[in-house]
Each structure stands twice: as structure tokens, then as C-alpha cells.
Amino acid sequence: MPMEYQLASQDFERFLADARDISMLATRNQTYTMVQGVLQVFRRRLDLRDALRFADVLPPVLRAIFVADWDPDEARLPFEDRAAMAREVQALRGNHNLSPDTAISDVAAALRKNVDVAAFEALLATLPQGARDFWHA
């Protein structure tokens, strides 16, 4: 059994702690909503092939969150300015979402601390410019 699956929960908790600390949110639940929102906002802007390739470089729990409840027939959105996409992140469970305006860059910074950075960067280099810019911390 691959170690990434054996340690999936521990690795996810470490990622959540990093994202919480970077974003200065107070709880795991607030952080989870922010992370889920960021992943969904990004996913809406990729074609199916690129989204699945992106999922492959994520740790197992983040990979599962990225693909959960996905409607692959949903209309693909263009990459917009970061402020507009941050508002989209904040719209997920709006009354319970405390994601800061910096949610995308905060999650990007936490993600880079918890992935194989070389594999992540190699994948980003193959994606459209908007996708690469999205993950700039």
C-alpha cells in the first residue's frame, strides 16, 4: 500500500494547519471551506483532461476534495482577476464562509508546502497561463 495513502489523514491535517495559519482563520471547518472553495473555483476553469492531470499531483485527500461533487458538464469559466475569483471562493456556503480576500494565494502557499513542488511546477507549466497564475503564492 503506498505511503501517501497510509499517511493521507496526517498529511491532510498538516496541510489544513498550514492553510489555517497562513490565512489566519480560527478553525479547521473555516479552513476546509476555504480550501474546498479554492479547489472548486480552479476546477471550473479547466477542461476535464487538465483537471484530472492536476488532481494527480495533489495529495490523496485534496485530490478527493477536488473531484467530489463535480459536474463535468458544468460550463467552463474563464480565469478572471484574483479579486473576482476570491469572491467566488467566498460564495461557497456564503453564510458560513470566512475565507479572506487572500484565500487563493493562502491555499496556494499551503499547497506548495505539501506537494512535490517539482511535479506541481512541471504540471503547471503545461496548463494555460491563467491556471499557472492562479497558483502563484
Image: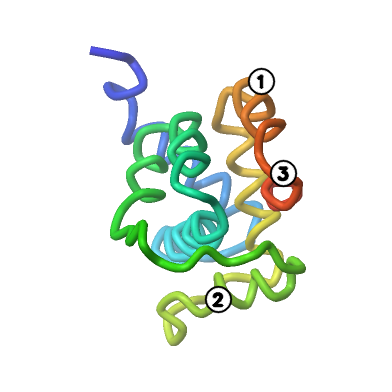
Q: Which residue is mark 1?
A: 118
Q: Is residue 85 left or right of residue 48?
A: right
Q: Which residue is mark 3?
A: 132
Q: What crowding class fits label 1: few (fewer than 14 Cα within 10 Å), some (14-19), or many (20 or more)?
A: few
Q: Is residue 70 left or right of residue 41?
A: left
| Residue sticking out furthest to the top | 1
Position in image of residue 109 (x %, y %):
68, 44
Position in image of residue 58 (x %, y %):
47, 34
Look at the image and tell me in which quarter the N terminus lies.
top left
Q: Is residue 121 above or below residue 29?
A: above
Q: Is residue 107 above or below residue 114?
A: below
Query: Residue at point 65% right, 69% down?
Result: 85
Q: Which residue is mark 2?
A: 90
Q: Earlier in the sequence, mark 1 or mark 2?
A: 2
Query: Residue at point 76% right, 68% down?
Result: 81
Distance from disc 1 to disc 2, alpha carbons, whole Å, reads: 30 Å
Q: Quadrant of residue 3?
A: top left
